[in-house]
Image (cartoon, rainbow, N blue to C red):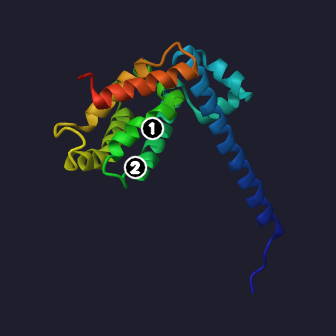
Amino acid sequence: MSVKYPYTNLATVIMNKRQIIAVENRKILLDAATNVFRQHGINAPLQLIIDQAQLGRATFYRNFTDRRDLVLALMHQALARLEQKAAFFSQYPDGFVRLLKNHVHNLPYLTALMEYWRVIERDDPELQQIYLRRNQILQPLIDTAIQHKICRADLNSQDYALVTALLRASFQGMDEAAQIRLAERAIELLINGIKA
């Protein structure tokens, strides 16, 4: 018969509570970074993020060593959203087009990260891994769209990056309602073209 120590369960409860708080703090910091980067650009002072999150500097630096680390965390978060959306849209032959149209609902994230290249070098190994994973997520949707003759045969995952770059560039300096209208128009032009 084994002896159970009451402190073991208490320590587990305390640790779990600390872990939950740590996860919540990280989410608060990422949300604050999205808002600050969207309003002030990616080189905004990190203190603005800390202030908006209403957390201490120590909490920020426990989560992110520097701006690059923060931006990479935002990119990983965006990649997770992309993976989730791609999985959902994969049930449709036009899932890739639906994914593009869905970007209208991701405007805060697109605009917040539009200047990531100012912080992370293009040849950064972690960024290269993000690109690789993005391409792996998108390629099945693109292949399905091509197979069903919904998209042109030479479409590839790098074209997706070009499309989202065009969208991101369209969203600066406007209020959210105007951004949504502009995004819907940009996607309509991208999908249907400018032909008569």
- Residue pictured at 27% horizontal, 33% vertical: 158
CB within 8 Å, label 2 to label 1? yes
- Residue pictured at 57% horizontal, 14% vertical: 40
| Mark 2 surroundings: few (<14), some (14-19) or many (≥20) residues within 10 A | some
Closer-to-camera residue (97/72): 97
| Mark 1 surroundings: few (<14), some (14-19) or many (≥20) residues within 10 A | some
Element on which disc 2 rests: helix
Question: The disc labelled 2 sits on which kind of residue?
Answer: Phe
Give the farthest residue toward the bottom.
Answer: 1
Give the quadrant of the C terminus.
Answer: top left
Q: Is residue 123 something that shows in the picture? A: no
Label count reads 2
**Residue 104 placement, left or right of 8:** left
Element on which disc 1 rests: helix
Q: What's the distance in space between the residues labelled 2 and 1, CA to CA?
A: 10 Å
Question: The disc labelled 1 sits on which kind of residue?
Answer: Asn
* Residue 65, percent from left and from top: 56, 30
Identify residue for label 2. 89
- Residue pictured at 34% horizontal, 40% vertical: 97
**Residue 187 placement, left or right of 70:** left
* Residue 12, percent from left and from top: 73, 60
* Residue 178, percent from left and from top: 53, 19
Identify residue for label 1. 102
